[in-house]
Amino acid sequence: MLRTKFRYNPENLRFERVKISFFNVFVSLLSYLTFGVLFFIGLLLLQNYFIETPSEKKLRADNESLKRHKIVLTGQLLSSNDQLDELKKLDLELYQKLFDTKLPAESNASAKNREEILLAELQDFNKSIDDLNSRFKDLYTSAKSSNHFFHTKASVKKEDLSTLFSVPSIVPVANFELTHLVSGFGIRINPFHKGHYHHDGVDIASTRGTNVLAAGHGMVIMAKRSDLLAGFGNYVEIDHGHGVITRYSHLEEITVRMGQKIKKGQTLGSVGLTGGSIAPHLHYEVIQDGVNADPIKFFAEGLDAEQYQELENQSKKQNQSLD
């Protein structure tokens, strides 16, 4: 209830009632409003600086913990990323050595760098740490399984090395290119009578004088020269053991002798045009347990998966041989 105010008037020596003015009302309301706003701001400041909710206490504790352990976490993340990169590099090198092809592309859509992880919210940060732990566990499981397989199934003993080296696994012509294979193993057209016959090897075209190489370790069991314009011409045979023999025909020169021990990649002679041949090339055969086998199946070194597939497709073309 508003109190009535009176003011003394000295002129008439009487107390007169004070009239309420708009200005006085405005000033009063403004003062009350200002006081209310300042009081509200004071309460907010008091709550923010002196009173904490349970949620604020937890967040403040988490922030303090992150500040204290940021250096440790940064070091751990750097070390983790370096170890992951090194493991991927080793895995890639091993894969390429074993399969002669590139490792399938891996999606990195979920990968995050160190800065993104450290600046993330607590929930995202914990999720990133869990993802890193999961990646490490997957890599460890994969590496453990691979190591067990290679140790038990794919390990090579010292006494097996000579057997591996004796396998005729390289293309037996120096500076070989895929286009040099002009005729493959199987039914082909004979260049002389144009009829179909079984081509017992592969024809690798090259210039005369190109080095012919031993496809694997072994011993020379035949080094024959012939002036006849038919047959194999000058040719060499190597016994690689385990029932495998390789034959190199139509040579220009022969640089090895009967009974000589040969190492993989050693020069046997040079490409020529001797015997029944219509162009300079090497006619190469693989004989396994007395039966001619497709030499393409033995070309395991020096070719990646795509090159081998292209070579195999090229060898299957039903074309004319050169001998």
Image: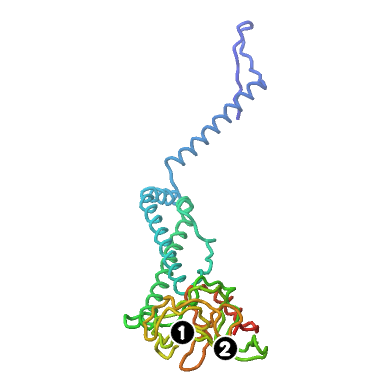
For badge 2, the amino acid type reads Ala
Q: Nearer the viewer, residue 255 or 227?
A: 227
Q: Nearer the viewer, residue 101 or 117?
A: 101
Q: Nearer the viewer, residue 220 or 290?
A: 220
What residue sits right under mark 2 in the picture? 230
Q: Secondary structure at mark 2?
A: loop
Q: Secondary structure at mark 1?
A: strand
Where residue 307 sits, quadrant-wise, is bottom right
- Quadrant that contains the C terminus: bottom right
Question: Residues at badges 1 and 2 in contact (C-beta under 8 Å)?
Answer: no
Relative placement, left or right, of 292 versus 70 is: right
What residue sits right under mark 1 in the picture? 236
Across and down, in percent, residue 81 comes to: 42, 58
Mark 2 crowd level (few <14, some 14–19, many ≥20, 10 Å Cα)? few
Label for residue 78?
none
Mark 1 crowd level (few <14, some 14–19, many ≥20, 10 Å Cα)? many
Relative placement, left or right, of 171 versus 64 is: right
In the image, what residue occupies the spot 39% across and 86% down? 258
Q: Nearer the viewer, residue 315 or 55?
A: 315
- Quadrant that contains the N terminus: top right
Where residue 241 sits, quadrant-wise, is bottom left
For badge 1, the amino acid type reads Val
Q: Residue furthest front?
A: 227
In the image, what residue occupies the spot 41% across and 80% down? 256
Across and down, in percent, residue 223 comes to: 44, 85
Q: Is residue 296 above or below residue 90?
A: below
Q: Earlier in the sequence, mark 1 or mark 2?
A: 2
The span from disc 1 to disc 2 (Cα, nearest Å) is: 16 Å
